[in-house]
Amino acid sequence: MIKVLVNGALGRMGRTVCSAVKADDELELVGAVDVIAGEVEGLTVETNLDAALKRLTPDVMVDFTRPAVVFDNVMTALANKVSPVVGTTGLSDDAKEKIRKLAELYDTPAFIAPNFALGAVLMMLISQTVARYMPEVEIIELHHDKKLDAPSGTAELTAKMISEVRPPHKQGHPEEVERLEHVRGAEVDGIRIHSVRLPGYVAHQEVIFGGLGQTLTIRHDSTGRDSFMPGVVLACKKVRGLKGLTVGLDKLL
């Protein structure tokens, strides 16, 4: 049995992760941590992550907390030689590099995924293939209005994957002017990303390619948080067999 502690256990994703871990025959839910005390899946939710990791000695810590605290959470897990499986987005490239170095120092693998839904991973891989033939592309990501960071980690990773197969270039009219600041969205190597935050959404993304007389749209929709659970469970089972830091669910498929 792989022992799992869930950090952010009282949040919407955290509760769903706790249920998924509890339901899997190969995983054991041994601990739950959040900023406030409570109860989930019959466990008392603790508030001190370091103390819980030391006392419970889990193999894996799943983190669905907040961008402002996720880096410190991961460092705490690695210092206790517990493998973090991270679904919280907002980590910078510099933070990921520090995580990689600490994971290697402690010989404790870490895993980060901007999106744990299989369909989202396929969307990114398909988009990378299409970009070789239709390099003009923009991304629209749509999430619930409680999401703290923008753009989403999925949108940013999609843009980076596309930029690997097409040269960076400015899209649209070379003399276009934004009469309202940021109306054309953020930019990654010339790829525009637009973020929508509204109640009613969970996690959605469109990758729109344009060519002469045609467009091609690839869209993925997570209509419930359970869509992420097979990926989370897979990561919990696979992470201890990895080395250093691994980013992206596609590396496990």
Image (tube, rainbow, N blue to C red):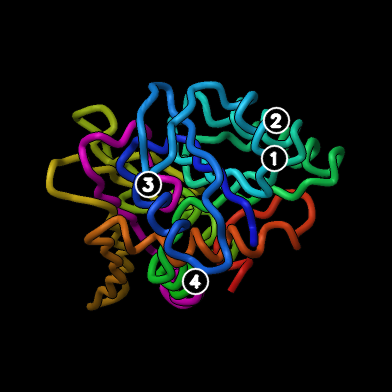
Find residue 57 and name its label.
1
Most extreme residue toward the front, as rendered? 42
The residue identified by callout 4 is 125
In the depicted structure, whether residue 67 falls above or below residue 24: above
- The residue under the point 27% across, 71% down is 217
| Label ID, residue 248 | none
* Residue beneath disc 2: 54
Q: How crowded is mark 3: few (under 14 residues within 10 Å), some or many (20 or more)?
A: some
Looking at the rendered structure, the secondary structure element under dot 2 is helix
Q: Which of 52 and 249 is in front in this view?
A: 52
Measuring from the top left, give residue 167's x and y in whole percent: 56, 60
Q: What element carries label 3?
A: loop
Residue 98, x across and y down, in percent: 73, 33
The amino acid pointed to by label 1 is Thr
Q: Give the range drawn in magenta.
A: 127-155
Q: Which of marks 4 and 3 is nearer the N terminus?
A: 3
Gap in angstroms between the C-alphas marked 3 and 2: 21 Å
253 or 57, which lies in front? 57
Mark with earlier residue (3, 2): 3
Q: Give the residue at mark 3.
A: 41
